Image (cartoon, rainbow, N blue to C red):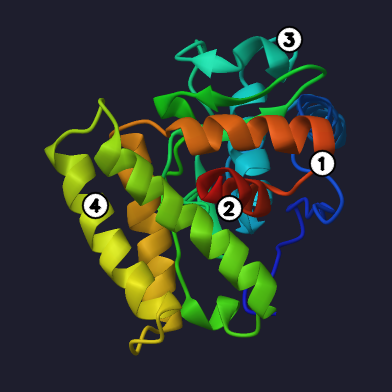
Amino acid sequence: KSLPSEKDDLVLAIDTSLHEPSTDQVDRLRDRILDSKEGQTPSFIVGVGGGSAMDISKAVSVMLTNEGSSCLYQGWDLVGNGSIPKMAIPTLSGTGAEASRTAVLTSEDIKYGINSDKTMFDLVMMDPDLIANLPNDQRFYTGMDCYIHSVESIEGSFINTFGTAYAKESLELCEKVFLRQGGTDDDLMVASYLGGASVANSEVGVAHAMSYGLSLVLGYRHGIANCITLKG
């Protein structure tokens, strides 16, 4: 109701409750959009949801202008053509997908991101009212993804001054939220964005790398898998 669609808009509801985003899913959505538009590309994409929905939006925006399967672009700077302009409206905070250059997808045998400047959102609208009624477990595990982003950025060998600044502020906000020091939904939402920005100026570390295996092989959701590997 707060974001009404116009008559020419295509609204796609994507179920992310059972599976994390996959290359097959992105390819099917790309084909569906092109079919509905009779081969014409949309002028703008709005991704509303959590990290999965935002990653799908980023990946689809790239695949509407690049040929072949999205699995061909899993890697670093493999995207040739520019993407469709896009906007993120996060309804879950922690993944940092609204700020990062990565659209993480699973394919047949790997979980890996389309890592490109062309995947980044052109606009982001962050409204803390949209995360006010999240279940506590989902809020915690997704929020921990943000915390781990910042820890890995600071400890990583690819860190720079920008990444350090983003990560330190994100960690302070996470501690306010998780240690009940007066942290608010606004704090969590900004922490998520800054955590994603820290990774965009650095790289994730071993906890994330190992969590991908838990997600791909055993089906653990990303936030839970991260907590398992960080604790281990």
Query: On the image, numbered disc 1 is attached to which residue?
Result: 219
Spatial CA distance of label 3 from label 4 is 36 Å
Question: Callout 2 environment at 10 Å: few (<14), some (14 to 19), or many (20+)?
Answer: some
Query: On the image, numbered disc 4 is attached to which residue?
Result: 166
Indicate which disc, 4 or 2, sits on the residue closer to the N terminus: 4
Q: Quadrant of residue 177?
A: bottom left
Is 74 positioned to the left or the right of 24 in the image? left
Residue 55 point in image, percent of width and height: 61, 41
Q: Is residue 91 above or below residue 220?
A: below
* Residue kind at label 4, given as amino acid type: Tyr
Question: From where the camera sits, is residue 41 visible?
Answer: no
Q: Residue at x 54, y 15 (%)?
A: 75
Question: Callout 4 environment at 10 Å: few (<14), some (14 to 19), or many (20+)?
Answer: many
The disc label shown at residue 73, or none: none
* Residue kind at label 2, given as amino acid type: Cys
Indicate which disc, 1 or 2, sits on the residue closer to the N terminus: 1
Spatial CA distance of label 4 from label 2 is 21 Å
Residue 218 point in image, percent of width and height: 82, 37
Q: Residue at x 48, y 21 (%)?
A: 82
Residue 163 point in image, percent of width and height: 23, 42
